Amino acid sequence: FPFILRRTKEDVAKELPPKVESVTYSPMSEEQQKMYDKWRNSYRDSIMEEIESKGLNKSKFRVLEGLTKLRQISCHPQLVDNKYIDTSGKFDALMEMVEEIASENHKVLIFSQFVQMLKIIRSQFDTDTIPYSYLDGSTKDREAPVREFQEDENVKIFLISFKADGTGLNLTAAVYVIHYDP
């Protein structure tokens, strides 16, 4: 039967200090909150109607759909409406964290399950001419961006989708890991 072999830091680098986890909360922007409330109310109403007419078991997909939509709006409303032009509280907080990490000359991995979210971040980095490496499930040559991040001192940021991880990714240059949308 198949099994997964995973090396942990404790197995290969005993000299490293223990992992430190930090959760950062960021309020939504005013426009983002309005959009969130509108979608939340709409989904709540439609879900309650569907539960009443079809029952809870047959309404689970609608519940998951609503939760996903609200998570996307929390990340950045452009994930739901590409015409949205205002800011996102979480996005602004991320940009501040990245600026601070890079100013301290550290490297950071930024994970997201939403490839479109990585593209929004990527677009901002392109606008600000911030060098980064990028890897998602559609990346053909996985070694090139990994090598670039590991070896190029100018590349402090690696944008990576959860679906792009897996066997053979060794990203030891990063000091920080940010899960954008846990």
Image (cartoon, rainbow, N blue to C red):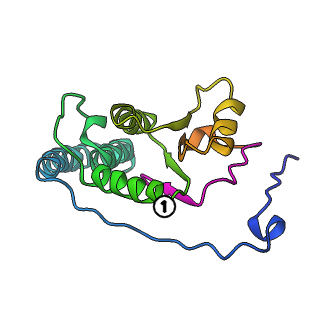
Give the x, y percent position of residue 57: 39, 49
Give the x, y percent position of residue 43: 21, 45
**Residue drawn where x is 46% and y is 58% of the image:** 101
Q: Is 34 contained in the magenta span?
A: no
Give the x, y percent position of residue 112: 47, 45
69 left or right of 40?
A: right
Asked which secondary structure carries label 1, the reply is loop
Viewer-closest of 25 and 149: 149
Viewer-closest of 170 and 138: 170
Viewer-closest of 15 and 110: 15
For the view shown, which residue lies furthest in the top direction?
140
Three-letter code for the amino acid on which mark 1 is drawn: Glu
- Region of the chain picked out in magenta, as a range: 168-182
Report the quarter where the C terminus lies: bottom left
**Residue drawn where x is 80% and y is 73% of the image:** 14
Eyeballing the image, is 131 above or below 2? above
**Residue drawn where x is 52% and y is 56% of the image:** 105
In the picture of the structure, the residue carrying the numbered disc 1 is 104
Residue 80: quadrant of the picture: top left
160 left or right of 81?
A: right
